[in-house]
Amino acid sequence: MAFLQTNFYSKTLKKLVNFNALLPIDAIEIPGMSEAQKGPMKAIYLLHGYSGNHHDWVCGSKIQELSLKYNVAVFMPSGENSFYLDDTDRGELFGEFVGNELVEFTRKMFHLSDKREDTFIGGYSMGGYGAIRNGIKYSHNFSCIIALSSALIIRNIAGIPVDYKDMMADYKYYNRVFGDLNQLLGSDKDPEALILKSKEENKYIPKIYMACGTEDFLIKENQSYHDFLVSEGIEHTYIEGPGIHNWDFWNEYIEKAILWINE
């Protein structure tokens, strides 16, 4: 297993950025075990949650073991607290970064498949939202989306007053990250609107794997999006299981999601 920490200049973020990479290129062949697939590798881009960074998946999960076990390259960028959206005022296009630039850069740098069916995006919490939003918006790159305990908070913050504050942030933060909150519903930051637009334009919609803990504070938001996908006839897998918003849950379901990708 090769573990790399890479620094490069991002044109979409206009600064030097870091990402971690796991590359199962040195697997030892053990008698009795299936032989590792040769050729360009499949790749998954995993996004962290609010207040996290590109080290979270490596430090909090068993993703190194899973990368080797399932022979998939894993790339973990830092999205700061951007919800992986484009801030045009500051010139930091995090959506474009994870949806296009990082995919293109890593394909040039590593021996990766350039096929959509071999390329996936996933995340937890804020990263789950980012995976859904950017997986759909940049569906020319991704065939599958993994969304764990996703922060699908669009309807919670749409039209909030200027004195609003919740357990995570306040009006100023949400207004900066999501833009005009009175125009949020129906925009390209709205995962429901993105599905409807994709259907209208007959665009490819990636398969979606959603999982959320039954005791998670975001369970209702995930249930609501599941219900929406059902109503629109969108292919997806939705699972609820015992758990809260923590690594115990994400560790269990990231492996289940990778197995789902390989079905």
Image: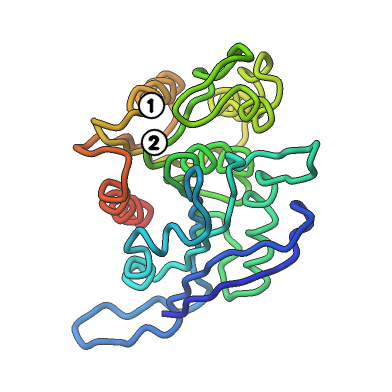
Q: Are marks 2 and 1 in contact (CB under 8 Å)?
A: yes
Residue at 48% across / 23% down in the picture?
166
Residue at 55% across / 19% down in the picture?
157
Within 10 Å of disc 1 (Cα), the crowding (few <14, some 14-19, many 20+) is many
| Nearest to N terminus: mark 2 or mark 1 | 1
213 up-or-down from 163: above or below: below
Within 10 Å of disc 2 (Cα), the crowding (few <14, some 14-19, many 20+) is some
Residue occupied by mark 2: 236
On the image, the x and y values in percent for residue 96 come to: 70, 47
Q: Could you tell whether 141 is left or right of 121 in the image?
A: right
Residue type (three-letter) at the residue carrying disc 2: His
Q: Nearer the viewer, residue 25 or 128?
A: 128
On the image, the x and y values in percent for residue 144 come to: 47, 47
On the image, the x and y values in percent for residue 26 come to: 42, 85
Residue type (three-letter) at the residue carrying disc 1: His
On the image, the x and y values in percent for residue 69 come to: 31, 70
Q: Could you tell whether 245 is left or right of 81 in the image?
A: left
Residue occupied by mark 1: 226
Q: Could you tell whether 65 is left or right of 40 in the image?
A: left
Of circles 2 and 1, which is in front? 1
202 up-or-down from 90: above or below: above
Q: Quarter of the image for the N terminus: give it.
A: bottom left
